[in-house]
Each structure stands twice: as C-alpha cells, then as structure tokens.
Image (spheres, rainbow, N blue to C red):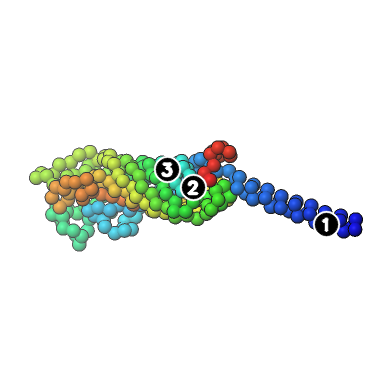
Amino acid sequence: MAITHAHNMYKVYVTVAALWLLTASVVMAQEDTEYRYEVGAGVGIGTYYGDFNSSLFGNVAPAGTAMFKFVLNPHSAMTFAGTYTKAKGEYKVDQTYYPDMQLEGYSYNTDLFDLSAVYEYNFWPYGTGKEYRGAVRLAPFIAVGVGLTGARCDNRTMDYSALERTSSNNKVVTANIPLGIGVKYRYGDRTNFSLQWMMHFSLSDHLDGAKDPYRVKSDGLFKNTDCYSVLTFCVTYSFAPKCPTCMKDR
C-alpha cells in the first residue's frame, strides 16, 4: 500500500510540474517585447504620369527611400519617409498632339524629392504572435497621407497655355497626396520586410517641365496635374521596447 501511495504521489507531482512548465511557457511566449519604432530604407523604381506618359510602368527610373515608423499598435503605424526618384522621357509624335512640339520635339529629365507623412493600416494584427495574441508575421496594408514634392528640371519650366510662352526657374515645390498598398513580413523578432506601391498625386503640372502643352489653361485642384508612383522593397529594424507592464497592446 505504501508503494502504491508513493507511486500515485509521484504521478501527481509529475503532472503538476508538467502543467506548471506548460503554463510558464505560454506566459513567457505572451511576454515577448513589443517595440515602439522602426527605422530602415528601401530601393525600387519610380514612374511619372502626366502629359508625356500614361503607361503604368513607362519610363521607369531608380528610386530610393529612407523611413522612420512610429508603431501605434499591431494594426497601425505612422511612417515618415524621404524618397528620391526621377521623371524622364521624351515626347513622341504619335502621342497626344501638342502644337509646339510637333517640330521641336521635347525631352524631360527631372529629379523628384519627396517628403511624406503616411498612416498605415494593417488588415491583420502584425507581429510575431508572441507579443500580441493573434498577430501574424505576414500582413497586407493600405496607406494614405500628405507629402511635399521638390522637383528640379534640367531646363527652365515652360507654361504653354499663355498667348506667349512664359518660363520660370527650373525648380518647383508642391504638395502631394500619397496613396498606397503593400504587404509586410516580420522576420525573427525585429526585422521587417515590405513591398509597397505608393501613388503621389501632386498639385503641379510642372514636374515634367511643361505646363499645359496643349495650349489650354487648366484650373482645379487635381485637374491635369502630374503625379508619380514609387514601387519599393524596404527593410526596417524595430527598436525601443515598450514598457512590459504598462504599454502592451493586448
């Protein structure tokens, strides 16, 4: 009887120890660190859309971006980014008829600098699944924000809508509205990869150096204005742990 009792007590101890280890592992898994910020960079391609190009990926140019993210919660973040790309190409006579360019021709080569503040919304909670219950490593997202575009053209910008052509200097600064989509992936605990496509709708028709080349003056916030898109592959690193007891987004 004593042997049986001791054997039963041993099984109880083993069971209790196993349950304690299982509970501790679950708790530890749910206590992994959350991070406030991300910093990183990306490379890709940029495309200008305007009077001389309407193709989705016509006349592509290299693009680069640097970014800083403030992580609000597993569903959202604010991204502050600086991006560089180019608008380049030439007018072809088989495109839209522009009277002043049929004989003269036209080419453009513009450096585009963009500063933007963008709100990102993840369709699924984003993370390792350890720091936030139900979070996933792969999540699609949408983005919207405000931005500022600086353009530096090779030649002086021209306004063709006036009775006589008027020119200004070769630099333009204008606001833009960025809209985009993308997908992000968490590798390990701190490394993030993302592929994103952002369309920037500017308020200027001068990004290609030519305003209203069909000689008709356009009015309106976004009427006949130039825009550009940037497709980038980005890598960011998470840092600055949140308080483990007071700032968890559970």
Which three-letter amino acid code belongs to the residue tagged 3?
A: Met
The type of residue carrying mark 2 is Pro
Q: Quadrant of residue 54?
A: bottom left
Q: Amino acid at mark 1?
A: Asn
Report whether 207 appears left or right of 128. left
Question: Could you tell me which residue is drawn at 15 percent across and 52 percent down?
Answer: 214
Query: Residues at badges 2 and 3 in contact (C-beta under 8 Å)?
Result: no
Residue at the outermost right position? 2
- What residue do we see at 16% from left, 55% from top? 98
Q: Is residue 162 visible in the rendered structure shown here?
A: yes
Indicate which disc, 2 or 1, sits on the residue closer to the N terminus: 1
In the picture of the structure, the residue carrying the numbered disc 1 is: 8
Q: Which residue is mark 2?
A: 74
Q: Nearer the viewer, residue 28 or 37?
A: 28
CB under 8 Å between discs 2 and 1: no
Asked whether the beta carbons under mark 1 and mark 3 sit within 8 Å of each other, the answer is: no
Q: Looking at the picture, how far across and down is residue 96, in whole percent? A: 18, 58
- Residue topped by disc 3: 78
- Could you classify mark 3 by the number of other residues whose Cα lies within 10 Å: few (under 14), some (14-19), or many (20 or more)? some
- Side of 5 relative to 140 (left or right): right
Q: Nearer the viewer, mark 2 or mark 1?
A: 1
**Which tag is nearer the camera, tag 2 or tag 3?**
2
